[in-house]
Image (cartoon, rainbow, N blue to C red):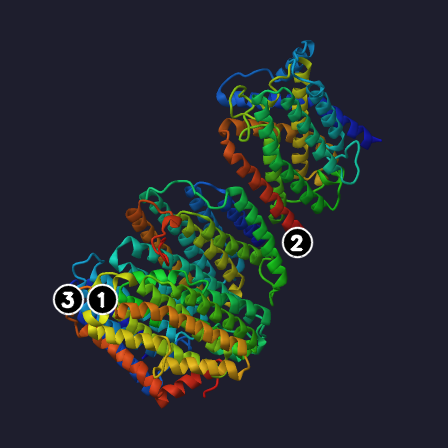
Amino acid sequence: MQEWIDLLMVLVAVTNLAILGVSRLRTCIRLSAIQGALLGCLPLMVGPLESWGPILLALVTIAMKGWTLPWLLERSLVEAHVQREVQPFVGYNASILIGVIAIAASFWLNSRLPLPFTPAGTLMIPSAFFGVLTGLFILVARRIALNQVIGYLVLENGIYAFGLVLMPHQTLLVELGILLDLFVGVFVMGIAIFQINREFDHIDADRMTGLRDWSDE
Amino acid sequence: MIAILSSILSVVLALVLAPLLLGVVNRTKAIYAGRKGQPLLQLYYDLYRLLRKGAVYSRTTSWIFRAGPIVGLAATALAIPLIPFGGGRGLFSFAGDFFFAVYLLGVVRFLWVIAALDTGSSFEGMGGSREVAFSALAEPALLLALTAVAWMTRSLSLSDMVGRLSWTLGPGVAPIAMVGCTLFVVFLAENARIPVDDPNTHLELTMIHEVMVLDHSGPDFAMIQYTAALKFWLLGAILIGVLLPFETLPTTVRWPVALGGMFTLAILVGIVESTMARLRLLKVPQLLGGACALAIFALILVVR
Amino acid sequence: MIAALVLIPILAAIACLLIRDSRRLGAILIATATIHLILTGLCWAFEPGGLWQGWLALDEAGKLFLTIVSVLFAGSALYLQEYFRREADSPHESESVFIACLLFFLATMTLVTVSRHFSLLWVAIEATTLASAPLIYFHRSPGSLEATWKYLLICSVGIALALLGTFLLAAAGTAAPTPVELSVADLTIHARELDPAWLKAAFLFLLVGYGTKMGLAPMHSWLPDAHSEAPSAVSALLSGALLNCAFLGIFRTLQVCTAAGIDKFAGDILIAFGLISMGFAAIFLLRQVDYKRMLAYSSVEHMGILTLGIGLGGLGSFAGLLHAVNHSLTKAALFLLAGNIIFAYRSKSIESVSGLFGRIPATAILWAAGFFAIVGSPPFGTFVSELTILRAALQQGHGWIAATYLGLLSLALIGMAGAVLKMLYGPSSSQGPLPENRLSLITPLIFAVLVLALGLMIPSGLSRTLASAAALIGGTAP
């Protein structure tokens, strides 16, 4: 089972790399959906299947991260008439390069912080760290508000994977609460994107410069 | 003795069958498009025809222009015996020969590019610059992928690397699959196939490889075409050698599997060319960069 | 009792969503705030029992912060009665949604103060972000939308990092021979068995995560925007209550770190963050053109001060908590007064406000008093707490920290004094004084008097609570 988990984590990491290198917003959203669905399978592999907990968590995760949230994002993509290109501050190849560096950094971090127990899969922690780093990078390196939400989702996915490492030691209720929060969060962000688009005729976060500390005199 | 004979046989097969593979690619595309298509052996006829013709040389070209095709063919032919085929060993092998093979291909490209520059035509110069720009990404991807394979097999010689990865269908395939993807992308890029380059276009401003060799004619062009076919075979042999676990197969089926693999690869290329469009030039570095990233990821996974 | 504290605002919020009548909405708001305040008062008299195997319980620190939240909310509710009447003609979102969100905000903040489990704490703090985002967008202007977006995104990311920190804490807990729950009680009991490396990593992530929400520099960038764009009563709650709730997250982490014996490591980092925040704030206070932003940066400064206080430990912990109380009351009063000034001058820029004494004298007097309180001059409570922090720094032989602290405090004083004096004096733009509404003055007046009283004498009950709360993070009472 451990090898299958590792294979899954490799796939998750590859979707992260793909999100970094892809130029279409819609593809980005789809990739995040695939990533969510992959992570949704994880509780089934990690958790003890005797109880209903992991199955419930898996179902909720797949429904939420694999379907509902991407659907919400796609809807705001359509409704807000967003430019379909990602428009990065940092180019695609540079992003991929940073992604590769982030992978290396994640493995290094993993070797520096040995877990007190043996995780279900040896790649779970590096992959989780990689997700966190990718999410943070997308948040700062992409121009469009919608894309920043995708970055936030990727970040959350990384943290979720990390949480699953600890699943044998933790209450599932927590994970469900987190999913609920995430759902509401993205929902509110979706509304905000819609409003931003109506108000500014664009959703470029970098053009929101109305508020600052002193005027340009 | 048998081992040496089989190595010699693999070299002979490569030299003889390479143009046939391109025929298979063309036939696949024709079938996909609902055409009858050119004969499978068309490239052989073309080569024969070109060899009988005389060459035309522009007055502005120098010896570099003439040396390009000859040295290119020689370098590729030198790389062929290094590549093991059908689970055997290459005719020659030494530690680090995969670097040698990759850089022999680099020499070919270098000579073709300076031959293109030698014509002084801005059109060919543009083709050369694109070729160099893209191979600057394809070459590291190839080397990184081969390094990952070298690490997995704990050897530095192509003969001990290619066809030596034993795996079963299951969880452990992640790095091998990633290396395979990288090698396939590099294979398409280096052979100027879709989605990187379109071998059918000859007079578009977007093409890469064909524009570079536009001024070559007669035997020179035949050599270039033959070199391209050999390169197709060479990279294809590495690709199927990495993907197929020859070690675990019984000796008798290794050769048929290897040949079948090569033709399947050719058919696959035909299908890719029929179903995909060529990428915009700006996107090609993204594709190759992604291939590089996959190779590095695979390397990290196996080194870890 | 704890259940009632959380559930009553939620029920009231749901009721608000169903009601459209503005007067009844106001009544619900006041009623809920009053009930909440009474219940909080009862918590001081009777020890409330825990719920859910101790996931929800009220300890001394929780009680302290619950009281701050409740008092501030009651004050803001009172102020809002007047606010809605005078904002009736400007575009804004529907009152029922606004008040419902406000009550949800109260419920989530209450939940933060009673959470004794790190996961629940996280869920509650994240919920405060979601409940308060619509409050910032009240005015429906491009500026408020921009502020809302920054607030949502930056705080969500911060909170996500805090979640990672929570998981790291759980990972540290797996080193213990027996399974350790993520509850504060369990973690402090088994603190010595936690894996120190993971605990340190957890502390860093939780500090950065909750620190983002608390407005510690350099993660503070959302704070000035959100505070300046939100309606004044909301700014008062954000600055006085919400920042403290986020601080409680850091406080809980520090509690575990202290029990695990890595308080030196944690303290040094807290001191660094505290001084950096004070430095950032001081620089931005020097040439501020917008008085609400000025108050926001002053919040960053004061969050820095109390972080420095608990980072120093010992006497500093006590002073830091006292400072949280003082700062909340003072800043809430100032933000509410800023609301009055905006109403009178229709502008947030310092440039266009002058002659407050001539135009709105009552607000002006309180504004001046608030200014003296916020810069920490005697006899206000802030003076006592800031002085105690200085004493703590000197006692522990941190001469350089004490000097930097004093320097930054005076820089902030200079920056704010220039702006406030310009606003108070100078030519009054119009003829006579404007009429001022009593409702909009009573809350700032009460808060100002409270801060003044705290400066003169700290009630023994409060002093005991502060001392035992400080003892949780290894602090001592003077």
Q: Residues within 10 Å of mark 3 (few under 14, many from 20)?
A: few
The Cα–Cα distance between marks 1 and 3, rounded to whole angstroms, is 10 Å
Q: Is residue A198 above or below residue B212?
A: below
Q: Is residue A33 visible?
A: yes
- Mark 3: which secondary structure? loop
In the rendered image, which residue does mark 1 sit on? Answer: C427
Q: Which mark is residue A27?
A: none
What distance separates the C-alpha of mark 1 from that of mark 2? 73 Å
Residue C391: x and y in percent read 48, 83
Q: Quadrant of residue A185?
A: bottom left
- What amino acid type is highlighted by mark number 3? Gln
Can you tell which mark lies on residue C431? 3
Task: Point out residue B262 in the picture as x, y percentages from the top left corner.
Answer: 65, 29
Chain identity of mark 1: C
The answer as to whether the residues below labels 3 and 2 share one chain is no
Q: Would residue C174 appear left or right of C307 to someone viewing this image?
A: right
* A25 vs C125: above or below: above
Residue at (53% x, 76% y) in the render? C400
The local secondary structure at tag 1 comes to loop
- Quarter location, residue C226: bottom left
